[in-house]
Amino acid sequence: MNFSTPSGFTFGSSLEVYDWISGFINMERGQSIRSFRLDRMKILADLGGNPETCAPAIHVAGSKGKGSVTGMATAILNKAGFLCSSYFSPHVMDFRERLSLGTHFFDENTYCIAGDELRRITETLINSGNREYSIFNKENENGEEPTFFELITLWYFLCSRAAKVNAMAVETGMGGRLDATNIIEPLVSVITIIELEHTEILGDTIAAIAGEKAGIIKNGRPALVAGQKDEALKVFQKKAGETGSPLFYFPEWGEIDDLRLKKEGSCFNLKLKNPIDGAIHNFKDLFLPIPGENQVENAGLAIMAVKIAFPEIPENAIRKALEEFSIPARFQRVLSDPVFIIDGAHTCRSAESVLKTFRYLYGNGGVLIFGCADGKDVKAMASLFLPCFSRIIITRPGTFKKSSPEGVYEVFCQLAPVGESKPEILFIPETEKALNLALELGRTLNLPILGTGSFYLAGELHKAL
């Protein structure tokens, strides 16, 4: 592919920039393992004047909850008077969700200015005969063009610098050690719960995956870790020891109690000991407009991360930020008649959390729309969902990632209970048709609906609605 553009060319919209980036090999559609290389990302950033250093950052990795933690940290910082940008992966409804300014998108001029700079950097690399850039030449045995994720990550840093932000909250894409975002030196690294995920890339044990996530822990910089299985915690403790990084294990520093779940959200108390200044913080009756114990735990991590990075953040900013917080596809009620909840849960533990909250608020026997990408533990998730729904519709979670909905349908059918408790299981690969049937069933039978299994499915459902 020829990535050159005419002399004097400038982007006219953020969509033009995104379409141009999408023309590159897309890591998320299945590149080789060697696509994960920080040397390429560092060269890209160096040519851009290292925009990743434009502001202090909070870096978040993990198997589940990292997007929520990133979003809540951003909301708190902006409510406290910072101009904080955020980086997420993937997006649900709009690609600009990936790189945004607080609760809003960057303005179009910022996206375009940063896009022009990104294009200039990329063309310099690809068209240059400089041997220093030979890793970007596909004719080189070890060479590959920049990946989609590398370029969109650099675009985010360039946008943040152009907007003159004074804080950043950055979520990793996959893993951590070789993730394109791992060129930053954050004020604090946060690692959420670890599960088996992306095993073909990250490894097939909890310890191996934890090792990849631990790669975001930087020399001498504090690391905040959510409650973990022992094999994951040992990896993080070892990494912190090797890097001289203070390790703060959230269960030892934070306590959540008096959790009250409502359809409108979650009320809870939080007690934190700030490891930086030793202060005890008692937050009473916090409210988060997302129901779920897992989201409350994410809120606790976000608050503690911000307090480690910026100890002077006032309680009022934290309280108001949580009260006003919203994020797509996290137990998001998109309709009330019938009740329709969309969640991007794609691991066993996240599915279990969503199901627990859904059953608590809406009971058993509802309608499930389920679709997931390849590489997920379908058997485990099917075993969770099958006893709890009377109608289950298996569909395709979009086309961005490879999926095998026929195979998912077969797994659900094989594991379904026999007799009267067996749910009706339908295979409708077209998402819009699946949605229409779910809505019809929900309305005629007065049943709540849950759409889950993938953030990509969540995005397709949003589009269809």
Image: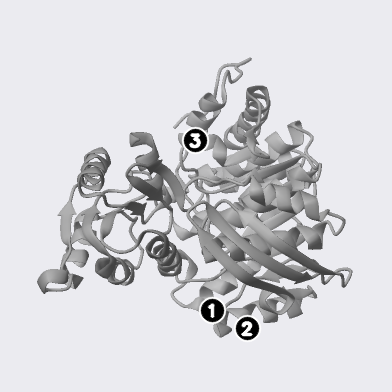
Residue at mark 3: 94
User: Do the residues bearing badges 2 and 1 touch, measured as CB atoms within 8 Å?
Assistant: yes
Residue 63: percent from the left, percent from the top?
A: 52, 64
Taking the image as shown, residue 215 lies to the left or right of residue 92, namely: right
Q: The residue under label 3 is which amino acid type?
A: Asp
Dot 2 corresponds to which residue? 234
Give the x, y percent position of residue 42.
Answer: 68, 50
Say whether disc 1 or disc 3 marks the residue closer to the N-terminus: 3
> What amino acid type should be assigned to the residue bearing mark 2?
Lys
Q: Residue 126 is drawn in which quadrant?
A: top right
Q: Which residue is mark 1?
A: 207
Is residue 8 placed above or below 270 in the rendered structure? above
Residue at horizontal 25 percent and vertical 43 percent from the top: 443
Residue at the top extreme? 8
Mark 2 crowdedness (10 Å alpha carbons): few <14, some 14-19, many ≥20: some
Is any atom of residue 147 visible in this view? no
Residue 280, given in percent of the width and then of the height, sits at: 83, 71
